[in-house]
Amino acid sequence: MPLHPEAQLLNQLIDREHPELGRALSSFGRRVYAPKGIPFQAQQASGCKVNATIGQITDGKGLPLPLDRLADLLKGLPQKEAFLYSPIQGRERCRTLWKNKLVAEDVRFSSLALPGVSLGICHALAMATDLFFERGDTLVVPDLYWDNYDQIFEVRHEAHMIHYPFFEGTTFNIQGLKQALGQVSGKVHVLLNFPNNPTGFSPTQNEIKQIADLLVSESAQRIVVVYCDDAYHGLVFEPTATPKSLFFELIDRHPNLIALKADGVTKELSFFGGRVGFLSLGFSGTVGQYFNEKICGLVRGTVGSPVGISQYLSEEELLDPHHEASFQNLKSILEKRYRVLKAGLSQRSPFWTPLPFNSGCFCLLRLKPGLQAEKVRQQLIQDESVGVVSHQENYLRIAFCSMTESDISFLLQALHRTCEKMLTMHS
Amino acid sequence: MPLHPEAQLLNQLIDREHPELGRALSSFGRRVYAPKGIPFQAQQASGCKVNATIGQITDGKGLPLPLDRLADLLKGLPQKEAFLYSPIQGRERCRTLWKNKLVAEDVRFSSLALPGVSLGICHALAMATDLFFERGDTLVVPDLYWDNYDQIFEVRHEAHMIHYPFFEGTTFNIQGLKQALGQVSGKVHVLLNFPNNPTGFSPTQNEIKQIADLLVSESAQRIVVVYCDDAYHGLVFEPTATPKSLFFELIDRHPNLIALKADGVTKELSFFGGRVGFLSLGFSGTVGQYFNEKICGLVRGTVGSPVGISQYLSEEELLDPHHEASFQNLKSILEKRYRVLKAGLSQRSPFWTPLPFNSGCFCLLRLKPGLQAEKVRQQLIQDESVGVVSHQENYLRIAFCSMTESDISFLLQALHRTCEKMLTMHS
């Protein structure tokens, strides 16, 4: 089916400025464009005395007509922000504040376009794969990864996945990543997630630089699409764990190296059900705006528009002079739990080995031979009323982000009892 | 690529109970399943004393730890509902209340499963197409339709579209729909949207029954997937316009007739930026739950989870004893504008003919020969500071939902002046 003329035009602009990006797009990614339809016409009429463009019920002067109970529940918020549509591309204020936050983290972000707004971080990742992942392409991802990547990459895009061991000794396995990349000739996709789910691990800043250098060198002869899943950004508890995203090290490093950053308010603003995420492309220049037009087309055709109220609320939090203190307070609560868990795990257990962790929301225990993670998980619920997540055959993931400090030692004792019982039962 | 065992199992359950539904699924639809991953394990642990399953920052007792400004802005809401994740399948209370609302509209809905929750009505439609639309399939849709169907069907699924004239005389063109369906052999997709965007038209209840009978008879030898886009449900202003969805007439009518209902709070609760929609399947029995597992898998892999806060707010509105009065009040505001616009258009114009309209948010004017809609639209912004939407070559859409009554006559006068000027300029 021939491309829509607007898609052709957008692709031409991309191909001229950055041919490698044009080639990296999937066939669906090349079909996507920001339609000059109703929202576009509404935008053009936004300054008019009379605006009869958009199918949004208002008082005729740009303010909503909320129903009574909704109006009452949200009476502390400006009604326009609480009830009306967000622009398809996201609220300008929200995007600007998020960009400012990222520039403050690393000034290299300042040359990039405003981030595109998604409906949560998963949606930012999913849109990125829509744009770049061709059916059957190869994704290189460690053996320990968020299970939803199976849905995003395998189920939708029939990805071929190449795994490598996450750890080499006590740190991230850069050699393993290199060897995995060596198994793929041609275009390849790489997903990296620090602080990591499920391990709770972040590398050092020096290791981040080594990873970036590796990805640059791997891009010499082919397209390398890198998805930086920064969902747990900012939650680091050791001076060795870098607080900075890998993404910054990839900006404008090589035209073949397509760096994508997915982040959002879910954990960073502790706003889980709000569903506001962001997707950024690591190239300076006008191409960032063309990329945002692709995002616009995707948002329009899959979810209509981003969440208005959640963007507004997130903006207000980011604008609050006490925001940083408020976030540090949240982080310190997690850090205390982290320390208690570290201390509890410092005693050797006959039943598990904790993998290295220094950040994020989780730690991962590798169970000793004879213990099956799924069976231990179920027994632990039944005997001890303790819930953990079984991961693959012999890992348990502990989410210390959702436990009190005082429950942590109870959990470890309960796990000890359950493992002991199960080994006895089977011996 | 082979199907995941969980997808195979889910498909077997569907194929056994309702083989036609199984055959109607797209190849991607057959790949989708609700993963027994972290959310599933978290659900199993939800009653535990200690729940360390989910990567959600809480106080360890199931309550969130919101940042200060966010907590302050939403202090009127329960924090759990305001900040934490919604279940992937949507909040039970939200789904139940929406189902109750639909059952109250038509008791035939009572035999169906709870609706699946989406992130807005567009997302419900997009998920439905993901499940049923195979690349290159044919969609039958009137010539006057919401332009975003191009994104949803053509851009993503490379749909072949067959159009037929929306109107036959002063009502919906059932014969045209029949002839269009006659052009397709084998599986076909049909989209119907009443009250309609862009025409603002709804058929009579008798015509709805005729449409349903036609769709049933067209399903005798093949799969017919019907998407009922009920975005503007409830906004009807004439006794002849049916207030009821076509969907109800399609429930359990024929095993080959796959009826899907997309609706939501956007217009029905005047909550545009909230992004809560619903997707329902028109078959009784356990198959509705299997279908919801497919929706779960889609939500998980594309947007992570639905919007928590917006679902909660919508529930509270639906539970409010004054909800119906509040909605009727909103509707009566629109109805007054509708009457003013009707009256204004009752005088013949040398420049346009209004198409029939009786419901929804819009009316559509067909411009007389010599007037190009896009040029008139731009001139109208420039000369009169009035925004309308140009549709195709010679239609203008007027959204009376976003105008005051008093602006309506001004708009018509301004449009008259602009049309007059443009015809003079070109003569």
Image (tube, coloured by chain):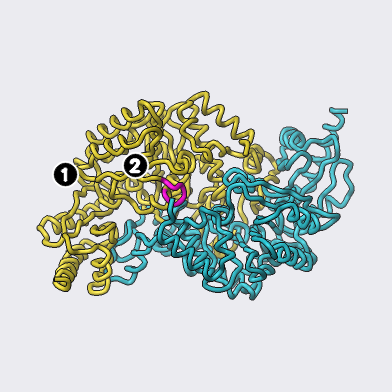
Chain colours: A yellow, B cyan
Q: Which residue is mark 2?
A: A140
Most common SS among magenta residues: helix
Q: Amino acid at mark 1?
A: Gly
Q: Which residues are magenta?
A: A154-159
- SS label for mark 2: strand
Residue at the image position 33 percent from the left and 29 percent from the top? A216
Check the picture and name the quadrant holding the C terminus of chain A: bottom left
Q: How many marks?
A: 2
Q: How far across and down, in percent of the image, does residue B386 sit?
A: 72, 40
Is label 2 on the same chain as label 1? Answer: yes
Query: What's the distance in space between the residues labelled 2 and 1, CA to CA?
Result: 20 Å
Q: Which residue is mark 1?
A: A169
Residue B345 visible in the current orientation: yes
Q: Nearer the viewer, residue A382 or B3?
A: B3
Mark 2 or mark 1, earlier in chain: 2
Q: Nearer the viewer, residue B362 or A320?
A: B362
Q: How far across and down, in percent of the image, does residue B113 sit?
A: 54, 70
Q: How far across and down, in percent of the image, does residue B261 sit?
A: 61, 62
Q: Amino acid at mark 2?
A: Val
